[in-house]
Amino acid sequence: MESINFLDLFQGIATLVAAEPQIMIGRIFLMLLGFVLIYLGSKNVLEPLLMIPMGMGMSSVNAAVMFLEGGRPGTLFVDPLISDPIQLMNILQIDWLQPIYTLTFSNGLIACLVFMGIGVLLDVGYVMARPFQSMFIALFAELGTFVVFPFAIALGLTEPEAASVATIGGADGPMVLFTSLILAKHLFVSITVVGYLYLGLTYGVYPYMIKWLVPKHIRGISMIADQGPRITRSQKLIFAVVASTLLCLLFPVAAPLFFSLFVGVAIRESGLENFSKLLGETFLYGATFFLGLTLGVLCEANTLLDPTVLKLLLLGMMALGVSALGGLLGGYILYFWTGGKFNPIVGIAGVSCVPTTAKIVQKVATAANPGAIVMPQALGASISGVITSAIIAAVFISILR
């Protein structure tokens, strides 16, 4: 029996040793980053539903690089860059996550499944009770999108690429995925990964931004007296049908997302419990799991080590930061407009990472004043943010496609 070479036996180490220095460092960094995401997710510092599977995928895929046919390095997870139909049919039978990626990511299906689940969870009555207030906040909370778009062009990105990364400012992961897939497919992986990484960070960073920018006595303003009119189920159902039809008519290119969101709302308000459970639990949690896992697996060093990714990281951070500031600005305008009755921290809920930002706002308000109630207004702003970010994405796609 011939002696066995240690590096031939442990190919993950062999490919690490044989790689160029920047690839080797990148793989080690991403493995460690995966550990950090899992830890922060498990401690609820970051969103655990996304960060734990994403961290597992990130650390594992960068450890699992091996020598494939012809001696080229690769993995048995997924190949996001393959486009030749014959090669794709072959790789579908080899890479275990390739069917999930090809049949749900590259056509936007996974974004639609998430939107259906979100729709079941949304109570549009919060928007209908305070439509002006909710939409006003949501528009201000899109400031990052409007600021980053020209800034990205100035950094050398094309208009479709700039629009794709600018949508990160809406803090709506499925929308970022859908938009980048249509406008900048060559950057789809990088933009989506950056977008979801930063969406996870909002969970931990936004509370500190609120505390830095809003004094405690203002953070503790309660709006329990603002009950708003009672909205019936029939009114919510009519709203869902009319809104879906109208938005699909105006922006057919984003019709899959509008339909997915509002069909979830319609099922919720129709009282179809079995369908609600299917969409709100099975579809939503299943899609979220595979979304996080596949995004983590796509964070392979060879894919992400591109000079453009550094720009995307900068722009993504800028988009979410400016959107948060814009939301708070809108909140302060309503605070002064109402003579101090409106709690300005509700503004950050307009950054539509629903319902995360609304929960953050209520938690911060409760910490300042245990009797403060701002959740109804925060949910109205957050749900409006989802609709607003979808409309802005549709406008970008319609103009730049």
Image: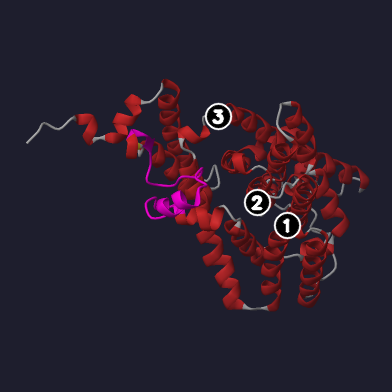
Cα–Cα gap, marks 2 and 3:
22 Å
Residue placed at 40% from the left, 41% from the top? 61
The first of marks 1 and 2 along the sequence is 2
Identify the residue position indicated by label 3 in the image.
306
Q: Residues within 10 Å of mark 3 (few under 14, many from 20)?
A: few
Q: Main secondary structure of the magenta part?
A: loop
Task: Tell whether label 2 touches label 1 (CB within 8 Å).
Answer: yes
Inspect the magenta stretch and tell me whether residue 81 lies in it: yes
Res. 198 in view: no
Asked if 13 appears above or below 234 in the picture, the reply is above
Cα–Cα gap, marks 1 and 2:
9 Å
Q: Residues within 10 Å of mark 2 (few under 14, many from 20)?
A: many
Q: Is residue 145 left or right of residue 1?
A: right
**Number of the label disc, if any, that sits on residue 5:** none
Q: Which residues are magenta?
A: 71-98
**Three-letter residue code for mark 2:** Phe
Identify the residue position indicated by label 2 in the image.
178
